[in-house]
Structure formats: C-alpha cells, structure tokens
Image (cartoon, helix red, strand yellow):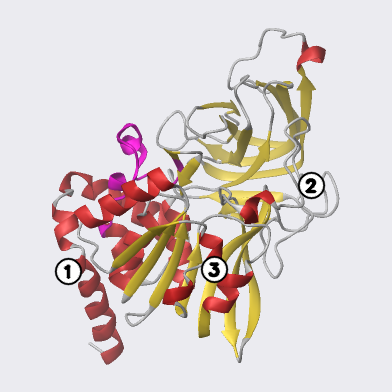
C-alpha cells in the first residue's frame, strides 16, 4: 500500500473512530445511511473518502423532529420547525467536500437550526464554531450535539451574518442559509488562504459560490444553482427583490441559459444525470434538457422553487414538450418519468405533493400539460422534473407554468387523475 493510500485509509479510520460511539447507538439506521451514501451521495459525485465516512456515520435522524425520522436518510430537505429546514444529505456532503476540511481547521458554520452540518464537520476539523439563527432550534441543536458527544463543536444563537468576531479569523466558513449577497463581516473574518462557501442571490434564484482569500482579496467561483431557506435578521429584511406569490412562473423553461462553465441549466438546481446539449430539432432555441439513467432507482432529475400565494392562486397549469427513448419504470410504481410539485406553508411544516406523467416507451416530441390544485395555505412550491428512478432517456423543452387566479378558476373540480397527461 502506498503512503498516500495509507494516509487516506488512516483518515477514514479516524473519522469512523471519532463517530464510533454515535454509530453504535443507531445501528438500526446503518443500512439506510449506507444506501444514502452509495446511491445519493457517491453517485452524485462526492468522492472524498473522509467526507463519505462522516456522512455514513453521522446520525441524521437525531437532527430532525421525530415525525420526520422515517424520511431522514432520503435525499431531501425536511422541515424542522420555525420556518426552517435541514438540508438534503447530498447538499451537505457536496458543500463539505468543496470546503476541503483539514484536521487543523477552525471552521465557522452558520445554519438554520438543525446542527447536522456541524456534526458532519466535527470529525473532519479541529473546532467547529456553530451559529444557529433560531433560538428554540439553536438550543435544541446544542443539546443534541452535546448528547451525541460532539465535544469540538461550540454553539451560539444569533444573526449568523455578523459572524463570530471574538473567535475570528476562521480557516473555513460554511453557510447553509441564503443572503442576497456575501455579508461583509464573513469576508473580513475569513483567514488568509481560507475558503468560504455560501448560497447567494434572490430568494428563488440562488447560486452556491466558493470564495477563496488570497493576499487579502477574494476570488469567486460559482458552483451550482441552489435553493436554501432565508436567514433571519437585518440581512434578510434588506433584500432588494421580494418574492411575489401572486405571479409564480418557471424561469429558464427553454433551458437555454447554462451555469457558467458547466453543462447544467441555470436557475434549475440539484441536477442529477442532467445536461442541456444543443439539439437541431429543439422545440425552442438551440438547447433541450436531457435526463438519462441506466440503473433503476438512481436519480436523474432537476428542481426549481418559486413563491405561490394560495389565497390568490387557485391552480397552476404546467405544460412542456417531451421526447422519450426506452423509458422504463424503476423499482416501484412511483419510479417513473414525471413532474412532481410540492407545496409548503409559511412555516414549512405543512406540505403536500402531487404529480403527473408516468411517461413510458419511445416517442417523438409531444406536448403534455396538467393543472395542479394549489392549497389555500401554500406560500411556496418546488417543482421536480425527472426519471424519478426510472431508466432510459427523457428530453424536455419549453417548460411553462401559468397561474390561474381563484376568481378566474371559480374553484372548478379537478377532473384529471394525478398521472394523466393531456
């Protein structure tokens, strides 16, 4: 075994040893964690063995409310109360890997209240200084971290965008809630040579960016589109662009705009096995969205979030052009190419999902559309397009969404089944 391989093996062993006590106390979740790491994280592109080991050992179910624990090891954000969510496992692993954590690092972690990101970082670095923005959630996270034995995590509650001046400078800073721009205090508290990873942008048009400080100046690298919950406090209230739930719409529905230097569509986020190649017979412009999967159960999908005011909007009409090649179901009846939409209320505790699609076989371009009923309590939604575990190739273009006001719809009954494409 080479010196590099011995060093890597030692690093992984150290992570597992560090978290051994936690893992032994949650063995009945071990299989779920292993599936999460293999299917959702490693296949999504995370390769750092220390990060994978930490994700494999960290008990995510301990950081979500009891009623959410059955979903703890699926790659999805989950509500944790106070209008906040815990990030999906892949996002946590991706951000952790991009941070490039070292055993000597002092890391500032700014979260929304779960404590999970701090727990994942704990065995990878020297000290984690964790700021949670919601008092009740922050106190609960601190108790959970202490109970599980994360002794190198120091917690406090407050406006994370102000940083932690008395403990600065920090070798790394990681932020899991979204401001409109990078807060100045965080730039100033980053050490020379340090890394800062943070989602920035408008409420529903965010980009995950990586900042590196060299000779006192920050270089910026855009990573991927993202969607994180907002921070509370002054930085959030001073947003220049406010969400308008009365006029929801899909952005970049023709997939012409791409992420800088990449092959993924801009605005759409968390794309898996997705690309936007140029196509001679595109239905609009020059590009189409292409989703391909050869292994049943593996995700191939994209997402987009938007505000929607259920008091003003009764229905959402979704329409798009699709083309299929050898489309087959995955491991269950729900693993078929489709469009899903999930609605949330203002506290992100009440939610409901619906879908249409179930497209199978091989077919040329065709237009499909459907109307989704908007709950009165809805304030935002996330739409998902993908193979959803199915196999084959699905291409899409001209994705459109039209809001139907309550007065216009007159509350007409829903005559279309959940999987019917008109």
Image disc number at residue 197: 3
Instruction: Give the answer, above or below, for where 155 lies relative to 172.
Output: above
In front: 193, or 362? 193
Q: Secondary structure at mark 1?
A: helix
Q: Residues within 10 Å of mark 3 (few under 14, many from 20)?
A: many
Q: Is residue 34 left or right of residue 84?
A: left
Segment colored magenta: 57-79
Depicted 291 relative to depicted 211: above or below: above
Q: Earlier in the sequence, mark 3 or mark 2?
A: 3
Indicate which disc residue 17 carries: 1
Q: Position of residue 170 (x, y in %)?
A: 45, 78
The crowding category of the residue bearing disc 2, from other C-alpha atoms within 10 Å (few below 14, some 14 to 19, many at least 20), is: many
The quarter of the image holding the C terminus is top right
Residue at 70% from the left image edge and 23% from the top image edge: 370
| Residue 75: in magenta span | yes
Q: Secondary structure at mark 2?
A: loop
The one of 18 and 171 positioned closer to us in this rendering? 171
Q: Can you identify the residue that label 2 sits on?
A: 254
First-in-chain label (2 vs 1): 1
Note whether 275 is above or below 83 in the view shown: below
State the residue in front, 287 or 402.
402
In the rendered image, residue 113, in percent from the top left (x then y), is placed at 42, 49
Asked if residue 298 is positioned above or below residue 198 in the image, the reply reads: above
């Amino acid at each position: 075994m080479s010196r590099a391989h011995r060093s890597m093996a030692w690093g992984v062993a150290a992570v597992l040893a560090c978290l051994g006590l936690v893992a032994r106390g949650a063995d009945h979740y071990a299989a779920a964690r292993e599936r999460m790491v293999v299917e959702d994280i490693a296949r999504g592109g995370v390769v750092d063995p220390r990060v994978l080991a930490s994700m494999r050992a960290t008990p995510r179910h301990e950081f979500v409310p009891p009623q959410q624990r059955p979903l703890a090891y699926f790659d999805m954000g989950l509500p944790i109360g106070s209008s906040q969510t815990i990030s999906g496992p892949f996002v946590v692993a991706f951000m952790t890997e991009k941070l490039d954590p070292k055993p000597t690092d002092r890391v500032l972690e700014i979260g929304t209240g779960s404590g999970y990101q701090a727990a994942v970082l704990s065995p990878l670095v020297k000290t984690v200084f964790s700021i949670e923005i919601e008092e009740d959630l922050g106190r609960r996270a601190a108790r959970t971290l202490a109970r599980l034995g994360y002794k190198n995590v120091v917690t406090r509650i407050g406006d994370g965008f102000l940083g932690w001046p008395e403990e600065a400078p920090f070798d790394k800073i990681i932020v899991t809630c979204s401001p409109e721009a990078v807060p100045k205090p965080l730039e100033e508290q980053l050490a020379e040579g340090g890394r800062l990873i943070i989602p920035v942008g408008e409420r529903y048009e965010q980009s995950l960016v990586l900042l590196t400080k060299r000779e006192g100046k920050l270089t910026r690298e855009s990573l991927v589109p993202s969607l994180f919950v907002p921070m509370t406090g002054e930085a959030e209230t001073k947003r220049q662009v406010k969400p308008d739930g009365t006029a929801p719409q899909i952005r970049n529905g023709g997939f012409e705009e791409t992420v800088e230097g990449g092959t993924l569509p801009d605005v759409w986020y968390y794309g898996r096995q997705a690309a936007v190649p140029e196509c001679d017979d595109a239905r609009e412009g020059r590009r189409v969205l292409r989703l391909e999967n050869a292994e049943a159960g593996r995700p191939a999908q994209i997402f987009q979030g938007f505000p929607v005011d259920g008091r003003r909007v009764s229905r959402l009409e979704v329409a798009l052009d699709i083309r299929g090649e050898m489309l087959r179901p995955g491991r269950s009846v729900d693993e078929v190419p489709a469009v899903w939409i999930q609605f949330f209320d203002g506290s992100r505790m009440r939610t409901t999902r619906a879908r249409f699609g179930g497209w199978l076989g091989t077919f040329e371009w065709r237009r499909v559309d459907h109307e989704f009923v908007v709950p009165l309590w809805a304030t935002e939604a996330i739409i998902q397009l993908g193979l959803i575990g199915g196999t084959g190739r699905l291409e899409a273009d001209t994705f459109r969404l039209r809001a139907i006001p309550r007065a216009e719809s007159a509350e007409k009954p829903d005559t279309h089944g959940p999987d019917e494409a008109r």
